[in-house]
Amino acid sequence: MSEYRGMFKVGECAKYYNTEDAKVVHEEPKGVDIHNVHVHDAVVVGAGLAGMFAALEIKKAGYDVACLTKVFPTRSHSGAAQGGIAAALANLEEDHVEWHFFDTVKGSDYLGDQDAIELMVKEAPRIIYEYEHMGVPFSRTPDGKIMQRYFGGHVKDFGRGKPVLRACMAADRTGHVLLHTLWEQCVKHQVRFYSEFFVLSLIIKDGKCIGVTAWDLINGGIHVFQAKAVVLATGGYGRCFSITTNSHANTADGLSLAMRAGLPLEDMEFVQFHPTGLAGSGILLSEGARGEGGYLINDLGERFMKRYAPDKMELAPRDVVSRAEWSEIEAGRGIGGQQYVYLDLRHLGAEKIKERLPQVRELAMKFAGVDPIEEPVPIQPTAHYSMGGIPTDIRCRVLADGKEKWLEGLWAAGECACVSVHGANRLGTNSLLDASVHGKRAGKDVVAYLSTNPVFEVLPEDAAEPAIKEVEWVLNSNGPERPAELRKILQENMYTLCGVFRDQEKLEKMYEIIKDLQKRYKNIHIEDRGTKFNTHLMEAIELGHLLETAEVIVASALNRTESRGAHYRTDYPKRDDDNWLKHTLAWRTEEGVKFDYKPVVITRFKPEERKY
Amino acid sequence: MAEYTFRIFRYDPEKDETGRIQEYRFEPEPGWTVLDALNYIKWNLDGSLTYRRACRHGICGSCGMTINGKNGLACETQLKDLGTTVVTIEPLRGFPVIKDLVVDMEPFYDKLYAIKPYLITKTPPPTDKERLQSPEDRKKLDGKYECILCGCCTSSCPTYWADKNFLGPNALLKAARFLFDSRDEGFEERVNAIDDKHGIWRCHTIFNCVEACPKELNPTQAIVDLRKLMLRGRL
């Protein structure tokens, strides 16, 4: 590849930037005054699928909506989803929403609320058609319909049949096309984005959510957004773990803001680990690598799956394979005694790898510097999806007590919310569906609410006080601790102590570590004291969110003395329906995490053993 | 790995009159990308270093920057593939610098808005069914719909450097993505912006955009295809 060094010599760019042609932005910042208040009918926090669908729905109904996002909308992590979005369209073979309903319930290990799941799978075909009408470039069948593919856990005939073609797809870029198309529609309908705005607090007055505060990352300064309706769509919390498929931006912001407003979180112990993350980073390698015949190898060169799933070997379900890998690692049979094993594709041959697994090869080469044709790829289980979140009802309204009482003015949708449609374990391709269906439903419910003409509540004088205090504290922090180091300690320990295998001893140790880190967090310092594009400030605040959320994850995991779905306790290895067929509600308080429970909604399918 | 020297463009709008180059020296670990090195610096050596990053696996488009003179995504550029232990990292050219490696992308997005970057239809879609599109028609979108809006192409375009009103390779690729979509009926709405001296006719087929695109797309081809489309439309 050639380089265009001719015009500007490398190293001379400093001068170049000082010319008129590409001037440096140094105008006085706009709207940095803390009394700068924006007024919108509705404010949506987050611009992934859930957030943009909600914003679009509200805007189309004629209301004034603002969408706040800490990254430009198309940078949101919904775009990273590859495989597909589930809907029983039956474009290629027989399929029924009832089958999809059953698979999702079974996949959830019977912890999903069946009323919510039924609504979601019924809504699925319509939402796919809506996406198509918006312009999503789906792959097509020979007769021009939306193409569908197989995906783990989606089968025919109420779990009894063969795999079914249910995942609607656009090559291996399904999330990317949905995210970009939604953004295009938002552009078309002129949704007002506040891009690179980092939300700092919810404004709650008399049990009602009346707005948010946010930090303008580019210009610096706190802004206050007054609204009749606030929708949280802030995504997941994979960054609590060192090895994760999640974006750097998935730092549990919305969850911790909800907790600070006194709300509980639901089912936080359930975090899905995917078995084939690139070692060191956790970047996802597709399940196709195992599907095409890849071997999993330990330090002794053994195909260790023979010990854990002698029949299915590498093709066993995600959680089984993740646990097998971790067993090998804990037994000291990770490669060189390290926390990873090998995915060996070499026996497939160069031709098959290039033809069938081009993306796996590309990812391994680009992000680990390893060519699977020549060398085995180091992999390890990677934190992938957070089933728990902010408790909502099926209208996406946030529940102040976690059970029935709506916190007026507040909705939540997508990965940050817990409706709950995924229960203890999410099926592949159901996350894009969840985000889309519930984003839209939240938007619709906001519209219904706004149509009753609620008034703008008067903002209290101290509406921005917590936000100002937090920013000033971080900007002036002078302690000895470095946020990046505390975050590293948190993430690495969360991965080993609250990861694939958990037990009382590990979790208690983790809880102590978090308590210690929370103390040390009070003594941090940051090295960037400026107000403009201060990502060090943002990372420090995000660390606060991670520490609070991780505490609730660990406490909830310690509290649930059974194994169900993604939550595996080696000291309680069996599912215990008698005692634990219920949702956890966890409140973070000064005296530690407090618990309550609510029953699982079971309408049609009685719990049975989850076997594949 | 050997010791590397990272020469990074720094500019703090609250302190600096102009940009400068700051050097960091350390030994990266095998398999590290440029983004890994930036993260190492930010988290261990200098917390004030500022850059955008999100997904760190080449799909969000946040970390476009100029690495040893060539545009690319920091997250998917392997250090060992650079062929040197001296790595110069600069912000994307042609856009105003906000701070360090962060540029103002608004001029870039504005070009996108100008071409109406959304499917335009007049025929109502079928109710509760998808519109049909043949696999052949769908294939026409390959190489166009995969764009991640990282800005590497437009920032590498000498024509854009000279004419900031030029729509640039990115916006024109996006226009092609819609104009060649069998479902789209927005030719009239887009033609004025595209068939303009700052539109398709401004491109000098320098092909920098093709070299720069981390997704291996070909905006120049799209521009040439659009020219043919416009000529046919006039005839």
Image (tube, rainbow, N blue to C red):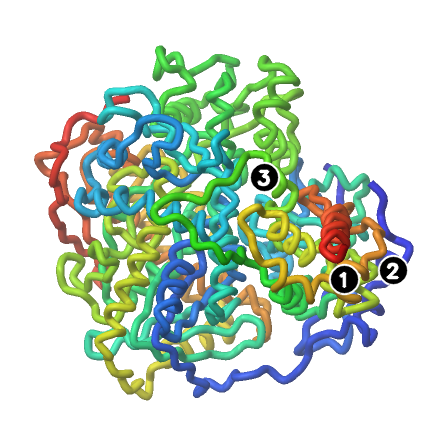
The residue under the point 57% across, 44% down is B57
Quarter of the figure with residue A155:
top left
Q: Is residue B103 visible?
A: no
Give residue A299's position: percent from left, percent from top.
51, 18
Q: From this view, report whether residue A416 is shown above or below residue A603.
A: below
Q: Secondary structure at mark 3?
A: helix
Residue B167 occupies quadrant: bottom right
Identify the residue at horizontal 56%, vertical 55% (top origin).
B185
- Residue A565 shown left or right of residue A254 in the figure: left
Furthest residue in direction left, as rendered: A578
Q: What is the spatial separation of the Cα atoms under label 2 and label 1, in whole angstroms?
A: 10 Å
Q: Nearer the viewer, residue A442 or A545?
A: A442
Quarter of the picture containing the C terminus of chain A is: top left
Pointer 3 and pointer 2 on the same chain: no
On residue A8, the disc is 2
Distance from disc 3 to disc 2, alpha carbons, whole Å, reads 41 Å
User: What's the amino acid at mark 3?
Assistant: Asp
Residue A316 relative to residue A99: left or right:
right
Which residue corresponds to the image point at 46% horizontal and 85% vertical from the top-left?
Answer: A36
Q: Secondary structure at mark 2?
A: loop
What x and y, as percent, mark residue A550?
A: 34, 51
Disc 2 chain ID: A
**Callouts 2 and 1 on one subunit:** no
- Residue placed under numbered mark 1 in the picture: B93
Task: Tell me: B97 left or right of A206.
Answer: right
- Label 3 vs label 2, nearer the camera: 3
Tag 1: amino acid: Arg
Residue bearing mark 3: B137
- Answer yes or no: do the residues labelled 2 and 1 have beta carbons within 8 Å? yes
Q: Chain of mark 3?
A: B
Q: Residues within 10 Å of mark 2 (few under 14, many from 20)?
A: few
Q: Amino acid at mark 2?
A: Phe
